[in-house]
Amino acid sequence: MNLEKNLQIVNTNIAEACKLSNRNKKEISIIGVTKNVDLETTKNLIEKGIIHLGENRPIPFLEKHEAFKNITNKPIWHFIGNLQTRQVRKVINKIDYLHSLDRLSLAIEIEKYAEKEVKCFIQVNTSLEKTKQGIYPEEILDFIKNISIFKKIKIVGLMTMAPYTEDESILLNCFEKLKICLNKIKELDEYKFVSIGLSMGMSNDYKIAILKGATFIRLGTCLFE
Ligand SMILES: *Cc1c(COP(=O)(O)O)cnc(C)c1O
């Protein structure tokens, strides 16, 4: 693993995708997904300037959170996996962003245990695969309306996971669907002046996600391979 070299490649690819889509690369943040690496490697990543970190399971997240809670460049923690309602209490006050808000029962638990507002991405199932988490695209406006009563939940964007495929048309289609959902939300009065982003793109497809407007890309494999 050559972290420095891998980061260079990623940055070059981001710059290229931005050029193609007329975007400013400052609009895009890399979340280093550390779920498969140890504390040492995570520390190296932070030292290379990646401070947005993503974990998808409570126990490893809590371990890393504890290990890095007093360092100078404290990580900004993104919980990117399915969060079971009974696990909310343990993690909700230690994360900065939740990327997997996908049901009312989860919102209810967050409202119960969060001590301050939690920034949440609504997870949308754009590939329509049965195995994927997330609400369906056509449910987005009803879902937003239903969770608007929760004071502790601040919607900061939408998240999706595309299927693992090399077929660019499938990937483009998923990311396009998420962008359409975002545009629907922006038509709502209460979101007119709110900045909301798109959490989409992983190692395999982040260049395509950027073309469609990604603001957070979640990268694991391509950083640590
Ligand atoms: C593991 C994971 C990633 C990172 O995937 P890579 O293909 O390793 O880049 C991104 N998002 C979620 C939700 C994940 O679980």
Image (cartoon, rainbow, N blue to C red):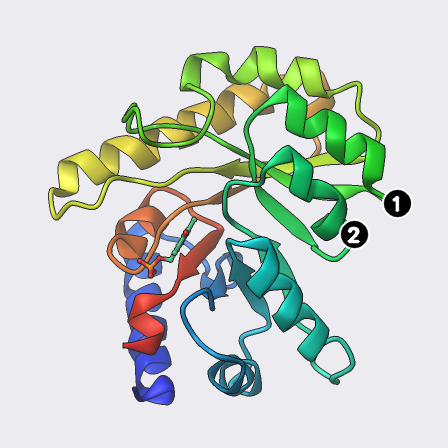
Report x, y in % for residue 50.
53, 75
Q: Quadrant of residue 37?
A: bottom left
Element type at mark 1 = loop
Residue 192 in view: no
Q: Quadrant of residue 14?
A: bottom left
Circle 2 Cα neighbour tier, 10 Å, few/some/many (<14 / 14–19 / ≥20): some
Q: The N terminus is located in which quarter? A: bottom left
> Identity of the amino acid at label 2?
Asn
Residue 200 shows in this picture:
yes
Quadrant placement of the C terminus: bottom left
| Residue at the extreme left | 167
Find residue 214 and name its label: none
Residue under numbered circle 1: 115
For image coordinates 15% across by 36% down, the residue present is: 169
Residue behind label 1 places its C-beta within 8 angstroms of ligand 1: no
Mark 2 highlights which residue?
93
Q: Residue at x 35, y 74 (%)?
A: 223
Ligand 1 is within 8 Å of the C-beta of the residue at disc 2 = no
Q: Are marks 1 and 2 in contact (CB under 8 Å)?
A: yes
Please state which amino acid type lies under the numbered disc 1: Glu
The residues bearing labels 1 and 2 have C-alpha atoms spaced at a distance of: 7 Å
**Is 57 located above or below residue 213 in the figure?**
below
Quick one: 214 or 75, which is closer to the camera? 75
How many marks overall?
Answer: 2
Mark positioned earlier in the residue sequence (1 or 2) = 2
Quadrant of the rendered image holding ligand 1: bottom left
